[in-house]
């Protein structure tokens, strides 16, 4: 109930049906982008979500922006496991190792507000010195694959959403990092 209220929803009815509770809300369609995954997580997969268009209503107001920032690539190239391993502590990534990225592409979601510029193409330094514990195995957490719905919910006014036949990508409107700061 709280999450739909944040998305400009109004509860119309609440009925007990056996061991389940049936809640009926009226929510603007634009506010439901990305809510399905959140709903399934909150109900642990037990909830049933049904949507139907009710009609047109007056504007419900502006939506709040996201509370997390983006991880933005600073270099063009292929992502490396070494760079991803260092970044994944602070972010949820949208790209796997070995995928081509470019400067200004949003490659993940930071845990804090504000964008974080990161080089996800940085390679591990190779030298012929050996040290114990230096060659730890790199364990990479699975990346979050973007969908059209989650991307539409995630973008803000300074970002764009690219749809190509092979991939879905988020990017900054201004690609160059030094120009974005201005």
Image (cartoon, helix red, strand yellow):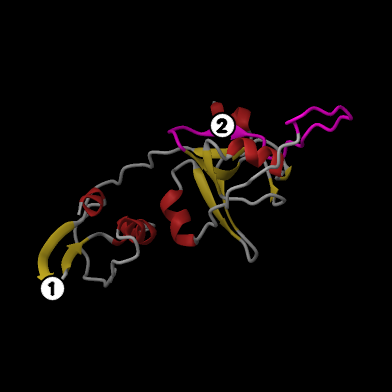
Q: Which residue is rendered at x = 64% and y = 52% of the image?
A: 96
Seen in the image, is 23 located left or right of residue 84? left
The residue range painted magenta reads: 111-134
Q: Secondary structure at mark 1?
A: strand
For label 1, the residue is 17
Quarter of the image that includes the C terminus? top right
Magenta stretch holds residue 124:
yes
For label 2, the residue is 180
**90 and 60: which is toward the camera:** 90
- Of labels 1 and 2, earlier in sequence is 1
Q: Is residue 103 above or below residue 43?
A: above
Q: Secondary structure at mark 2?
A: helix
- Residue 46 lies, in percent from the top left, at 30, 67
Q: Number of callouts in the render?
A: 2
- Residue 144 lies, in percent from the top left, at 53, 53
Magenta stretch holds residue 1:
no
């Amino acid at each position: 109930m709280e999450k739909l209220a944040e998305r400009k929803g109004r509860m119309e009815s609440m009925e007990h049906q056996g061991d389940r509770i049936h809640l009926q809300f009226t929510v603007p369609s634009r506010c439901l982008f990305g809510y399905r995954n959140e709903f399934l997580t909150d109900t642990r997969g037990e909830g049933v979500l049904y949507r139907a268009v009710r009609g047109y209503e007056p504007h419900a107001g502006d939506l709040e922006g996201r509370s997390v920032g983006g991880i933005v690539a600073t270099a063009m190239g292929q992502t490396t496991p070494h760079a991803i391993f260092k970044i994944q502590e602070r972010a949820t990534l949208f790209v796997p190792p070995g995928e081509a990225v470019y400067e200004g592409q949003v490659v993940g979601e930071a845990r804090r507000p504000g964008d974080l510029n990161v080089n996800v193409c940085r390679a591990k330094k190779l030298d012929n010195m050996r040290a114990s514990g230096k060659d730890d195995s790199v364990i990479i957490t699975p990346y979050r694959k973007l969908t059209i719905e989650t991307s539409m919910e995630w973008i803000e006014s300074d970002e764009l959403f690219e749809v190509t036949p092979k991939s879905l990508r988020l990017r900054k409107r201004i690609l160059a990092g030094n120009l974005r700061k201005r």
